Image (spheres, rainbow, N blue to C red):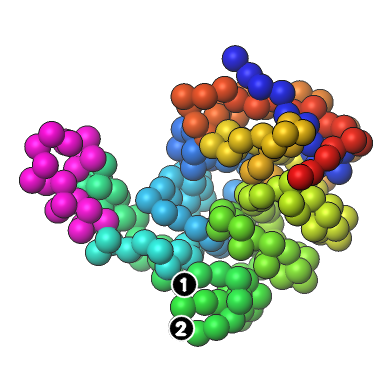
Amino acid sequence: MKTQSILPKFLQPKVINSLARVGGNNDGGYVIDKKNISNSDALVGLGMSDDWSFEEDFNSINSVPTYIYDETVSLKKFLKKCFKYIIRFNKPKIFFHWFKTSYNYIKFFQGNKFHCKKLVGIDLPPDYISLTTILNKLKVEKFSHIYLKIDIEGWEYRLLDDLIVNSEIIEGLVIEFHDLDLHLDKIEKFIKKFPLQLVHVHCNNYSPLNVNNTPIAIECTFTCEKTSGQLVTNLPNTQDMPNNPFIKEYTIDFSDKVLSF
């Protein structure tokens, strides 16, 4: 069963026939333009936690230098949790989760795959770095078709101007907007100025709807590819999955009369 949500018209995506799901089932996977994958020469992921299935899946299609930024996690922290539960025989699933996470971390982050332990939003060494600084470093290394995945729990609003300024080297973008109903004006201004096309929207059902049925968190996909110009009318699509598989997925109705708190 599904629950109806309401989004403003400016968030209604345009039709493109090359969408594909990348990443794990439920939370951590995203529907993006698969043409962007083959055309990218680098992948930058902002926000990781204990799930980098998107970056793994992306690289299984096109192996490119990959930089994931997240200061909140590390192999040391994963191993610490693993050892914590190794002696708790009544919680084997938790132990095996952290054991598998630690193993996958070691397996993935080698060669040209990097975990950068910094938070992205502002230039404040040593713990913080701006998106423009990250992209400028990649420009120096001659990368010019960069795919971006952004899920940084509210800090994404600090990056919107950087995304616009650096749009000429962005091949595609999937970004999660948090506290959506409090920032609709910022998002609308961003979409108007950002030259890439909005081609997919999905509601994150880990977050509730507000009293006006506006979702609190949504995932938005942008591409540099041309679209048909037609608007998508039915969401979620067949490739979408609920972030939380144990509660209802949100359908979307686009309206000019969307109210925030």
Mark number, residue 227: none
Mark 2 in CB contact with mark 1 (< 8 angstroms):
yes
Is 27 or 103 nearer to us in this picture? Answer: 27
Residue 6 spot, x, y in % from top left? 78, 31
Residue 72 is one of the magenta-drawn residues: no
Is 141 or 106 nearer to us in this picture? Answer: 106
Residue 230 spot, x, y in % from top left? 88, 32
Q: Quadrant of the C terminus?
A: top right
> Distance from label 2 to label 1 (Cα)?
8 Å
**Dot 2 lies on which element?**
loop
What residue is at 46 percent from the left and 72 percent from the top? 118
Q: Which residue is mark 2?
A: 126
Is 150 or 224 nearer to us in this picture? Answer: 150
Residue 90 spot, x, y in % from top left? 13, 34
Q: Which residue is mark 1?
A: 118
Q: Quadrant of the N terminus?
A: top right
At label 2, the amino acid type is Pro
The residue stretch that appears in magenta: 78-96
What residue is at 43 percent from the left and 50 percent from the top? 52
What residue is at 66 percent from the left and 50 percent from the top? 179
